[in-house]
């Protein structure tokens, strides 16, 4: 996988295996006025490979933001979050846990592993689009990101 050409674009890594959620996120980000590039990996092992630039991901750039689902094959989202936040080269990348889980225990575990935010996936399309706009406005207009 080679890096896309737009070096000034904000890079978002979506770690999600649900095709409907992937498609909806892609559409919402494409409709956005923010200059961004969305990458998607479908399991936790692939996410770590992407972030560590191994195998087919050797030429990708580091993402500016990670949207992380909890319910993933091969390695769940909490395991991925733990790996990211324990890695000196990755731990400053903001991670937004983006899950349908309403489980308080998942929320506590995610924050204990240093998630930057925990958001329940909106169920309605209009709310989903509003969430993506709010997310981009906050992380790419308000916040000063490290290594940017």
Image (cartoon, grey):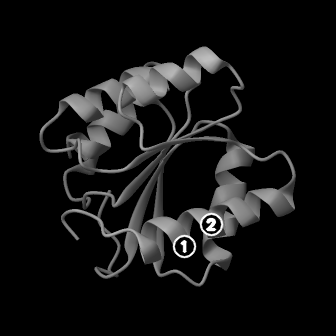
Disc 2 crowd, CA 10 A, few/some/many (<14, 14-19, 20+): few
Q: Is residue 107 above or below residue 128?
A: above
User: Can you say which quadrant of the picture contains the N terminus?
Assistant: bottom left
Per the image, the residue denoted by label 2 is 134
Where does the image place residue 90, in percent across and percent down from the top left?
21, 44
At 44% from the left edge and 60% from the top edge, which residue is drawn? Answer: 12
Residue at 47% of width from left, 19% of height from top? 109
Q: List x then y, in percent, for residue 131.
A: 69, 59
**Marks 2 and 1 in Cβ contact (< 8 Å):** yes
Q: Is residue 76 left or right of residue 29?
A: left
> In the rendered image of this protein, does residue 71 appear above or below residue 2?
above
- Circle 2 SS class: helix
Give the residue drawn at x 31%, y 82%: 8
Residue 41 pos. (x, y %): 46, 43
- Above or below, comparing residue 6 to residue 85 in the picture: below
Identify the image quadrant of the C terminus. bottom left
* Furthest residue in direction left, as rendered: 88
| Front residue (pair 113, 7) | 113
Query: Disc count in the image?
Result: 2
Q: From where the camera sits, is residue 49 visible?
A: yes
Which residue bears the numbered disc 1?
A: 137
The residue positioned 68% from the left and 78% from the top of the image is: 31
| Front one among 147 and 53 | 147
**In which image quadrant can residue 50 be found?**
top left
Where residue 21 appears, x then y in whole percent? 70, 47
Residue 72 appears in the rendering: no
Q: Residues within 10 Å of mark 1 (few under 14, many from 20)?
A: some
User: How far is disc 2 from disc 1 in space, using C-alphas?
Assistant: 5 Å
Q: Is residue 41 left or right of residue 8?
A: right
Residue 4 image label? none
Helix, strand or loop at label 1? It is helix
């Amino acid at each position: 996988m080679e890096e896309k050409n737009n070096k000034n674009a904000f890079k978002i890594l979506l770690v999600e295996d649900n095709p409907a959620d992937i498609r909806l996120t892609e559409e919402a980000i494409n409709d956005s006025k923010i200059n961004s590039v969305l990458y998607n990996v479908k399991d936790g092992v692939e996410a770590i490979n992407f972030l560590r630039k191994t195998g087919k991901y050797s030429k990708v750039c580091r993402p500016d933001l990670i949207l992380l689902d909890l319910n993933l094959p091969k390695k769940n989202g909490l395991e991925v979050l733990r790996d990211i936040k324990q890695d000196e080269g990755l731990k400053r990348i903001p991670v937004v846990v983006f899950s349908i889980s309403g489980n308080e225990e998942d929320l506590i575990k995610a924050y204990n592993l240093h998630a930057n935010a925990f958001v329940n996936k909106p169920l309605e399309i209009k709310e989903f689009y509003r969430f993506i706009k709010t997310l981009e406005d906050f992380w790419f207009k308000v916040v000063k990101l490290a290594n940017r």
